[in-house]
Amino acid sequence: MTSAVSILPGPQLAALNAAYRRAVARKRLNVMLGGAVFCVALVIAGIGAEVNVRTLFTYFGNFVSYFDRIFTLDTGARVWTDSGEWLWGWQKWLRMLGETILISYVGTLIGAVLAFGANFFAADNTSPAPWLRFVVRRLLEFARTVPGIVFALIFVIAFGLGPMAGVLAIAIHSTGALGKQFSELVENADMKPVEGVRSTGASWLSCMRFAVLPQVAAGYAGYALLRFEINVREASVMGFVGAGGIGQELVVAIRKFYYSDVSAILLMIIITVFCIDIGTGWVRARLFGKDARI
Amino acid sequence: MSQVPAPDHRELRARYPQVFDRPASARLATPLVLLLAVGIFAFGLVDLEFSPARLLAGLHQLGWISLMMVPPDPGPSLPIYLKALGETLSIALLGTTLAAVLALPVSLLAARNIVPSSLLRFPVRRMFDSIRGVDTLIWALVWINVVGLGPFAGVLAIAVSDFGSFGKLFSEAIEGADKKQVEGIRASGGNALHEIRFGLMPQVLPVIAGQVLYFIESNTRSATIIGIVGAGGIGLQLAEQIRVLEWQKVSFLILMILVAVAAIDWISGKLRSAIIGQRAVA
């Protein structure tokens, strides 16, 4: 039986082969050029960031021994041998963690409400006027791009030390992030219900309420929950600049070398973040069904 | 003209009980959840010491601050700020690259289709989760204790915290890869390393490259703030100027950050579409 693959005559094949090799060579050249540019960028960045490989090697032992030290009590024993001594401040820390979660909850809720107010103006398909869309979008972009902790630094000066500055900083940052995500949901919404509602003579507000909102409400809740999760992490460092929460305790422990406290607080933060992740995951599963992901 | 018969309410009720006679628990669930949410919110406002007087005084203060911010003016320290911005970009680039290089081999251990034993996979995944649970700023503080103040601590902080995120993302990308190509390599006699190199990597690398680019972008943002705790870059200048209330310099620095982030967004957007375009052709 002859093979079904027909072999082209020699000269024709040679031409095709040459073309193929040229194409491969060009691609390889592109990749190599890209790699070279990347390496040069890395070297420049290394000089800019004062990277010193010798320092790293000299001090890498410190990094390992740092973890050794934070898991050692003042008495020299390992932390897990005496959990009462290790977690001596658990009541205070739990209270601070509660405050952290509350900061992120209140901040996320304020942010979600503001984003809800803004998102219909920012979405392409529902915005009443182009200039309004432009203004709202730029505002959201600003709120999103300036890091939350920078807002916190400024708010600490304006509103005084304490959790209020943290809440407002998280609220503004969440407004920016959620506003964008919400408006993208609205842009993906089906416009036929809107036409249906408008054909009955409804106002813009009624169109949004009865045609768009029912389609996107669950998505809003999902994104807000996700943002809450992110904000718990963010709120855990707000204390670094004096804006409330567990960060205050942590930064004191790290700066003053209270080694075993560092590991205790970190452990409690990590457990809290886990619990929040699992909890919001559960709520999301209830909202969207088991395997839905946004 | 045809007449639509009047609906028989009793029959409709009987036919659609889930619409007309929802159980009390289902009808009460939404208001109860809302009430709970508002209740926690109100409790939070009280517990976190919100008061209208403080809010008004703060807003007043904030108004003053915003007024003093215009016009943005770097004063004589523009070269210092430009250098700091360069430092920030370097931190983002190096930190992300380092994290990606370190995370790629380890993420293989966390992928179900590479390591079938969940006993081995579980600790690796939990390690990624724990690293991600700790914020970049905290890692920065830790590394400052180890290598001293300066941008190098920032690079290492970004590298470690991204290592956790990359580990998770990469292993998900690997799990999502098509099995047929790996089987093809095995059928033609390749060993496990060949399977990874020729069956898996060509599928996974474009996805990973896209994610790394995205992270360089988002790390530009992170790198601007790790300076606040002393790990180099523009955040150091920003925190200093805020503390000494030099608002014109503050607004200039914020503008610099916004412009830099927008520029990086634009560049990485171009690069990403170039990479995805390559994948579509290949």
Image: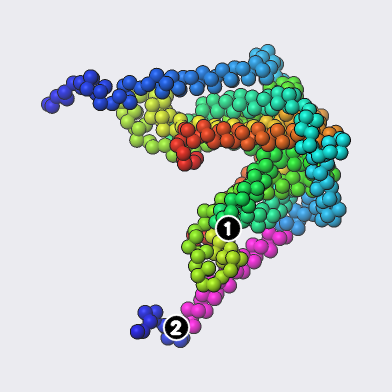
- Return the residue at label 1: B114
How far across and how far down the image is residue B73, in percent? 75, 35
Residue visible at 59% across and 54% down in the picture: B117
Foreground residue among A95 and B116: B116
Residue at the limit of the structure toward the bottom, as seen here:
A10
How far across and how far down the image is residue A70, in percent? 80, 39
Q: Which mark is residue A12?
A: 2
On the question of residue B93 being in view, the answer is: no
Determine if marks 1 and 2 fall on one subunit.
no
Q: Which residues are magenta?
A: A12-40
Residue at the limit of the structure toward the left, as seen here:
B1
Q: Quadrant of the N terminus of chain B?
A: top left
Drawn side of residue A42 relative to residue B278, left or right: right
Crowding around mark 2 (Cα neighbors within 10 Å: few <14, some 14 to 19, many 20+) is few
Residue visible at 67% across and 39% down in the picture: B133
Foreground residue among A226 and B123: B123
Q: Is residue A29 magenta?
A: yes
Foreground residue among A81 and B14: A81
Residue A251, by quadrant, is: top right
> Numbered disc 1: what chain?
B
Question: What residue type is disc 2 on?
Answer: Gln
